[in-house]
Image (spheres, rainbow, N blue to C red):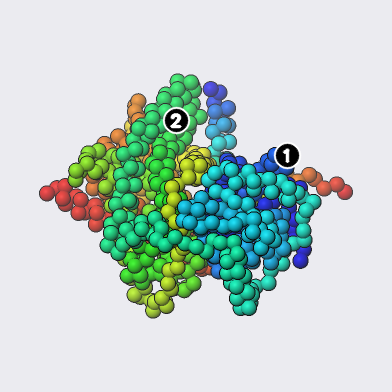
Amino acid sequence: MNAVLDNFLVGVLLLASVSYAVYKLGPRTLKRRILQTLSRAMAPPRLF
Amino acid sequence: MDVARSAPNPLIALVGNPNCGKTALFNILTGSRQKVANYAGVTVERKEGSLLTPSGLRIRILDLPGAYSLDPLTPDEQVTADVLLGRRSGETAPDFVVCVTDATNLRQNLRLVLSLKRLGLPMVVALNMTDIARRKGIVIDAERLAIELGVPVVETVGVKTAGVRALIKVLDATAMPERRVPGAVWQPLSRSDIEHDQAEVRRILGVVGGDRLDGVTFSDRLDGLVLHPLLGPVILAVILFLVFQAVFAWAQVPMDEIKLGVAAFGNWLGAALPASLLKDLAINGILAGVGSVLVFLPQIIILFFFILILEDSGYLPRAAFLLDRVMGSVGLSGRAFIPLLSSFACAIPGIMATRTIQNPRDRLTTIMIAPLMTCSARLPVYALIIAAFIPRRSVWGGLELQGVVLFALYIAGIASAMAVAFVLKRRGQGGGFQALMLELPAYHWPNLRNLGIGLWQRVEIFMSRVGTIILALMVILWALSSFPAPPPGATGPAIQYSIAGHLGAWLAVIFKPIGFNWQISIALVPGLAAREVAVGALGTVYALSATGNDMSSALTPLITQSWSLPTALSLLAWYVFAPQCLSTLATVKRETNSWRYPIIMAAYLFALAYAGSWITFRVATALAGS
C-alpha cells in the first residue's frame, strides 16, 4: 500500500476516534463548545 | 394553557398503573418498530413505536411509565404527568390516551381512569388481562363500564391479538388528527376529590362487577412458598445460583463460535491486506480489542434472558420483598432494593433511581454503595479471568465450578455493599424508618414476544457500545501502544518503547505490590471509561506485545501463560470493588450536586480495591508457596 495513503487513512481513523471519545466522555460544556464551533465552521459566510 | 401539539401523525399515549400489562400491549401494537431512549435529564425509559392502522393512518404510540396518580410521587409518575400535560420539554402532548387497566385489580386502576378523565383528553380504556380475571372468577361487564365511564372500553389480553384488533379499530375511528383538543389542564386532587373518586369507584364496581374474588388464588398459594421467611430466601439463592451456572454452561458453544469467527476474519484480513500500518491497526488494534469484548455477548444474553423471565413472571418484586429484611439489618431502606437491583445492569440508572428514596441520608448511602453491585460491564472481565484460570469441572455433585466462582463474585459485591452501608449508617445519625410498599402482581408465564424484544434491546445496547466507544478507545490505545516506534536494534516487543509502554511501566510500580504486570496496569486506564473496555485493552496490548506469529492468538491462552494464579485472583478482587467508570462518577456529581461525593466514592473504592487485591494476592501467593 502507498505509504502516504496508509498514513492518511490511519490518521483519519485516529482523529475520528479521539474526537468521538472526547465528545462521548468529555464534560457537557465541552460537547456544547464542540458543537458550537462545528456549527460556526459549517455555517455559510455572511453576505454584506 | 397552550401546549405544543404533535405532528400530523397522531400521538397516542399508553397510560396505566405499574404491572397492568401496558408494555406487553405496546409490544404487540408496535412489534419491533420501537425506539428506546431516556427522557431528558432522567433515566426513566422512553419507548415510542408506530402502528399503521387498516385505514392507512400512521399512529405514533408512546409507552408512558407506570403511574398510580397524576399527582406524582416518583420520577416515573412525574414523567407521565408532565408528558400528558405537555409540560415536558422536547415532548409533544399526546392527542389521545389509551388507559390500560388490569381487570384483576380494577378497584385500584379505576382511580387513574377517573383522574385521566379529568384531563379532558380523548381516551379509550383497554380492559387488559381479562383472561386472568375470568380464571379468578371476575367477570366485568365492559359495555356497562363504557357507559358508566363515558369512554369506549375494549377488552384486551396483552399477549394476544384478538382484543388488540378491536382496540386498533377504535383508534382508527377516533384518533384522527382533526379530532385534537386543546391541551390538558390538571388541578391537584383535593381531599374531597379523592373521596369522591373512591365513592365513584365503589359505585362503578358495584354496577359492572369486577369486585369479586374467588378467595385464595394460585398466586397466593405460590407466595406462601416463595415468600416463606425461611424457604423464600433459600429459593431466591437457588434461582440466582442456577442463573450463574447457566451463564457459563450454556454460553460455551456460541462463545467458541464467535472466537472462531473472529479468528477466521483476522486470518482473512491478514491475507487480504498488504503489510502496512492500516493492517496492524485493523488486526492488532481493532480486531484484537473489539473481538475480545464481542465474545462475551452470549453470556450477557443468557444473563438478561433470566433477568427478563424473572421480571416478566412477577418474581422480582417478591425478591425485593424478601431482601427488605436484609437491607433493614444494615440500616438501609427497603426502597434501596430497586436502585441496587438496577445497578446489576449498570450503576448509572441505579444511582438515578435513588430519587425515590425520600430520606437524604438513606439516598446518599444507597448512591455510595450502588457501584459495588456487579454491573454487566464487569461480566466480560470476570468471564475472561474465570475461563483462563478456573478449570471447567464439576464440583459438589454436578455444579459447574466456573459458575460457582462467578456466583461467589456477585455475592462478594453484595456483601461488601452491605458492609459499607453498615459502616456509613453507623457513622451517621441514621434516618427514620421508611416502609417498603410493593404491589405484588399475579404470577404469569413470561411472554416470548416481550422476552425477544427485551433481549434484542440488550443486544443493541451492547453492540452499539462495542461499535462506538469501545472501538474508538481501541484505536486510541493502539496508537498509544504503537508510537513512537522502537529504536533501531531494539529487541523487545514494540509496545515496550511506546507511550503506553512507558505509562504501563510507571503504573506497574504502583500496582506491583498487588501482582499486576505492566499490561494489566495499562488496561486499567481505558477501563475507567467502561469496565469491559479493560478486556479489549488487554486484547490489544497482548496482541502488540506478542512477537513472531502468535499475534492473532486468543486472549485467554495468552493470559493463562503470562499471569500467575495469585495475579488472576487479585485482578478479580480488584474488579469486585473496581474504582468507578467516569460516567458513574459524573452521574454521582449530578445527583448529589457536589464534587465531594464522587471524589469520596472514587477514593474509597480505590482503597477497597487495592486493599482487597493486596490481601488476595498475598494470601494466594502464600498458599501457592506452601
The answer for which chain carries disc 2 is B
In this picture, residue B564 sits left or right of residue B190:
left
Residue at x-position 77% and y-position 63%: B2
- Of B219 and A7, nearer the camera is B219
Q: Position of residue B500 (x, y in %)?
A: 42, 43
- Say which quarter of the image contains residue B315: bottom left
In this picture, residue B582 sits left or right of residue B625:
right
Residue at x-position 37% and y-position 34%: B255
- Say which quarter of the image contains residue B489: top left
Secondary-structure class at tag 1: loop
Q: Is residue B150 above or below residue B30?
A: below
Residue at x-position 54% and y-position 65%: B107
Q: Is residue B551 above or below residue B592?
A: above
Q: Position of residue B342 (x, y in %)?
A: 45, 56
CA gap, disc 1 and disc 2:
50 Å
Q: Disc number at residue B395?
A: none
Q: Position of residue B8 (x, y in %)?
A: 76, 48
To which residue does mark 1 refer?
B56
> Dot 2, how many residues are within 10 Å of its Cα: few (below 14), some (14-19), or many (20+)?
many
> Dot 1, how many residues are within 10 Å of its Cα: few (below 14), some (14-19), or many (20+)?
few
Residue at x-position 25% and y-position 38%: B392
- Say which quarter of the image contains residue B150: bottom right
- The residue type indicated by label 1 comes to Gly
Q: In this view, does B257 lie above or below A29?
A: above
